[in-house]
């Protein structure tokens, strides 16, 4: 079996396989082709890949490989150049018609991490979770370096400084890691989510749960659903005083398949103290915070006329920690490959619940669109 690792397009900094995982694969008999410079932005050199048993190439001949491991969704042009029946593993992105057509035309088996079932058995393959874990950590660091105050309580000869107050909204994988990171830095943390289990999860990592008294609801698989507008208004009203009193607000709320829910208005941000920092991890998927812009810091003037609050719109928080994010992603790719390869050959068993979920196109069938068809 021949597996290729392409250079990712800018601005992606991560790489799908790291040398450690390449070594395990080549020892198992897989031929691994790595495009020169593929790991450079994630700190992995061509020499490390070569030492791990990879063959370095200027450009992969896509028609000559069985598997492509990638991070960013592959463009239609690349899919159209793959060998008929080849397999791709990575982020699939939204179903753009030209990419779907190219994958179907070449009978590609395209796997999209976004569609992996969130089950215990799938945990080792869960790239959304591994990257959210990295992102949650990074959000807090982004806030800490911008905040003109300490995170921890500081008792010094020059006086006592109180700890920073941090509010985290959305307590999935990223939010829990944001809470844990803020706690490690010594902040006092409060958090809110709408899933019924979240209050206990928040307490288990040492934060206080903000109960907003809305009808918390859950869809299948442990995911949240959109709130009704009256519940959303009640949530905003209940959160407003906690946000106004916070030094840092971190938002990580998401609803699968939908734009990020808007949880915080500009008025709520403007009520914070001068110098406060808001980090919107969902800026690139619609934004939890009104006015946040991906990749930018936006200054919101404070309501009382003095100073401003910095609203940080993160673009690719996991990409900012490209080395570790890539290492974790590569382990996820390797685990998923382990489910697909039998005796050195690829065998796609769609009766396996993980593969049934994660395989997006197979043998000329768009399985996502197919599943969406009403039964006849
Ligand atoms: P996500 O990125 O889809 O969303 C982040 C969080 O935002 C979720 O906790 C969600 O409930 C919350 N949210 C959505 N709308 C909100 C609103 N209006 N107000 C406040 N919060 C809101 O979530 P995720 O990190 O992918 O995790 C979702 C769930 O899946 C969690 O229960 C998590 O524990 C679970 N999970 C399970 C596994 C597994 O068992 N293998 C793996 C990963 C995640």
Image: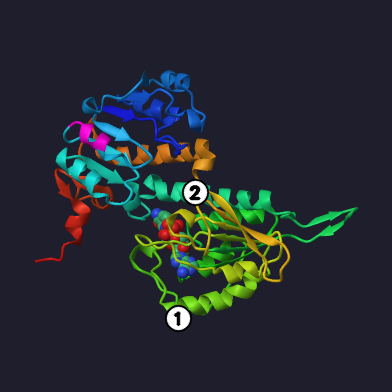
Residue 86, image x and y in percent? 21, 34
Pointer 1 local density, CA inside 10 Å: few below 14, some 14–19, many at least 20: few
Q: Is residue 32 visible?
A: yes
- Tell me, for residue 230, which label it has, or none: 1
Residue 322 located left or right of residue 310 = left
With respect to residue 38, does 74 lie above or below? below
With respect to residue 210, does 176 lie above or below? above
Q: Residue at x 50, y 52 (%)?
A: 294
Residue identifier under label 2: 315
Foreground pick, 305 / 316: 305
With respect to residue 56, does 340 lie above or below? below
For label 1, the SS is helix
Disc 1 beta carbon < 8 A from ligand 1? no
Gap in Å between the C-alphas at discs 2 and 1? Answer: 30 Å
Q: Which residues are magenta?
A: 77-83
The overriding secondary structure of the stretch rendered in magenta is helix
Residue 229, image x and y in percent? 43, 77
Q: Residue at x 54, y 75 (%)?
A: 236
Determine the quadrant in which ligand 1 lies: bottom left
Q: Say if the magenta span includes residue 192.
A: no
Farthest residue to the left: give it.
Answer: 376
Foreground pick, 54 / 257: 257
Q: Quadrant of residue 66?
A: top left
């Amino acid at each position: 079996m021949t597996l290729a690792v392409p250079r990712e397009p800018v601005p992606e900094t991560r790489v799908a396989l790291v040398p450690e995982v390449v070594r395990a694969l080549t020892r198992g008999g897989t031929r691994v082709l790595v495009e020169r410079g593929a790991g450079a932005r994630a700190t992995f050199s061509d020499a490390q890949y070569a030492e791990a048993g990879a063959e370095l190439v200027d450009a992969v001949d896509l028609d000559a490989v069985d598997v492509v491991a990638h991070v960013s969704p592959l463009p239609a042009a690349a899919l159209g150049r793959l060998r008929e029946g080849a397999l791709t593993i990575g982020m699939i992105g939204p179903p753009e018609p030209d990419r779907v057509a190219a994958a179907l035309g070449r009978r590609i088996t395209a796997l999209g991490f976004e569609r992996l079932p969130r089950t215990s058995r799938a945990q080792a393959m869960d790239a959304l979770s591994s990257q959210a874990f990295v992102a949650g950590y990074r959000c807090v660091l982004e806030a800490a370096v911008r905040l003109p105050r300490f995170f921890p309580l500081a008792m010094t000869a020059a006086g006592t400084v109180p700890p920073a107050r941090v509010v985290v909204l959305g307590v999935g994988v990223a939010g829990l890691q944001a809470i844990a990171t803020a706690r490690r830095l010594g902040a006092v943390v409060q958090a809110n989510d709408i899933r019924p289990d979240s209050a206990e999860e928040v307490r288990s990592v040492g934060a206080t749960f903000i109960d907003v008294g809305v009808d918390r609801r859950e869809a299948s698989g442990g995911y949240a659903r959109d709130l009704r507008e009256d519940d959303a208004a009640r949530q905003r009203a209940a959160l407003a005083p906690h946000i106004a009193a916070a030094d840092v607000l971190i938002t990580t709320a998401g609803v699968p398949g939908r734009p990020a829910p808007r949880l915080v208005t500009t008025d709520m941000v403007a009520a914070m103290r001068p110098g406060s920092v808001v980090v919107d991890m969902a800026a690139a998927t619609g934004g939890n915070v009104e006015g946040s812009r991906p990749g930018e810091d936006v200054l919101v003037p404070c309501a009382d006329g003095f100073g401003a609050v910095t609203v940080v719109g993160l673009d690719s928080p996991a990409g900012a920690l490209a080395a570790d994010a890539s290492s974790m992603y590569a382990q996820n790719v390797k685990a998923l490959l382990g489910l697909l390869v039998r005796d050195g050959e690829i065998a796609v068993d769609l009766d396996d619940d993980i593969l049934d979920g994660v395989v997006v196109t197979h043998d000329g069938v768009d399985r996502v669109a197919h599943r969406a068809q009403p039964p006849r």
